[in-house]
Amino acid sequence: MSVVFEAIIKVDEKLDWLIELKDNVVQRSHNCLDMDEFLQKIEEFGADYGGHIDEVKWSKDDNVSPQAMDEIRLLMAKHQQEIEDAKEKEG
C-alpha cells in the first residue's frame, strides 16, 4: 500500500497560516497551527504505517501570501538542517 499524505497550506480568519495535514487512507485530517505541530502530527500519522510515508503532496490555497510561503520554507529548511546535523553526530 502506498502511503501519501496531503499538506495544504491555508490562511485562517486571522490571516495566519496553517497546514491541513490529510491522511486519505483512513480519512483523517488535522489543522496544524505551526511547524512543530505539523512535524508532530506527521510523525503520529506515519506511526500507523510503521513510519513509512511514501510521499507528502504539498499544495496551497490561492490566498496564501508569498511571505507566509517564505516563512514555511525557512522553517522546513531549518528542520531539514537539524535532521542532517543529527545524522552527522550519529555517524
Image (tube, rainbow, N blue to C red):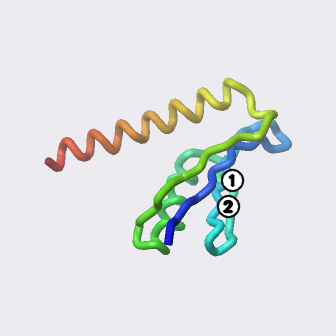
The amino acid type, in three-letter code, at marker 2 is: His
Q: Position of residue 32 (x, y in %)?
A: 65, 53
Residue 35, labelled with which disc?
A: none
Q: Residue furthest front?
A: 1
Q: Look at mark 2 in the image and give the residue it sits on.
A: 30
Judge whether 38 appears above or below 64 on screen.
Answer: below
**In the structure shown, which secondary structural element does the residue marked by tag 1 occupy?**
strand
The amino acid type, in three-letter code, at marker 1 is: Glu
In screen coordinates, is 4 left or right of 64? left
In screen coordinates, is 18 left or right of 80? right
**In the structure shown, which secondary structural element does the residue marked by tag 2 occupy?**
strand
Depth check, front residue: 74 or 33: 74
Cα distance between the residues tagged 2 and 1: 6 Å
Identify which residue is drawn at 35% across, 40% down. Answer: 82
Depth check, front residue: 6 or 71: 6
Mark 2–mark 1 CB contact (< 8 Å): yes
Judge whether 71 appears above or below 60 on screen.
Answer: above
Residue 20, labelled with which disc?
A: 1
Identify which residue is drawn at 52% across, 65% down. Answer: 3
Q: Earlier in the sequence, mark 2 or mark 1?
A: 1
Identify which residue is drawn at 58% across, 35% down. Answer: 72
Identify which residue is drawn at 49% across, 38% down. Answer: 76
Q: Position of residue 11 (x, y in %)?
A: 77, 40
